[in-house]
Image (cartoon, helix red, strand yellow):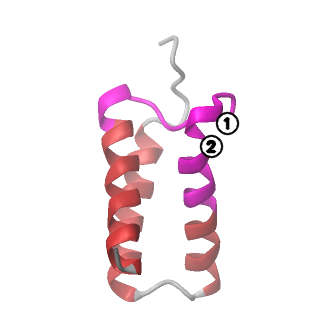
Amino acid sequence: MTQDERWIAKYNEVVEFIETNHRNPSRHRIEEHDMLNWLKATRKRMNAGELKLERVESFKKLLELMELYKRKNQYQ
């Protein structure tokens, strides 16, 4: 699996999680920490200007999706 394939797989995993559960990954659930770590690392790389241009567009769409569920938790 190439680096691009791994990035796309993780991106799709996070998008699917948000669309399925109607909330962002929680820092209080250990099984969701991998997604949070990926989001944090990718956001950091994007802000530093190290993220590939084609990934920046996709990641910005993901951030917009996350913004819709920013204040939602699993109990709502």
Q: Main secondary structure of the magenta part?
A: helix
Residue 26 visible in rendering: no
- Which of the 4 image quadrants contains residue 57? bottom left
Residue 1 visible in rendering: yes
In the depicted view, which residue is nearer to us: 61 or 54?
54
Mark-to-mark CA distance, 2 and 1: 6 Å
| Circle 2 residues within 10 Å: few <14, some 14–19, many ≥20 | some
- In the image, residue 39 sits, relative to residue 50, either above or below, namely above
Q: State if disc 1 and disc 2 touch (CB < 8 Å).
A: yes
Specify which label sits upstream in the sequence, 2 or 1.
1
The residue that disc 2 covers is 33
| Circle 1 residues within 10 Å: few <14, some 14–19, many ≥20 | few
Residue 55 part of the magenta segment: no
Name the quarter where the N terminus is drawn.
bottom left
Q: Residue at x 41, y 40 (%)?
A: 68
Q: Residue at x 40, y 48 (%)?
A: 14
- Which of the 4 image quadrants contains residue 17? top left
Report the magenta residues as a range.
19-40
- In the image, residue 54 sits, relative to residue 16, either above or below, namely below
Q: Amino acid at mark 2?
A: His
Secondary structure under the numbered disc 1 in the rendered image: loop
- Residue 58: x and y, percent? 33, 69
Q: What label does residue 27 carry, if any?
A: 1
Residue 25 part of the magenta segment: yes
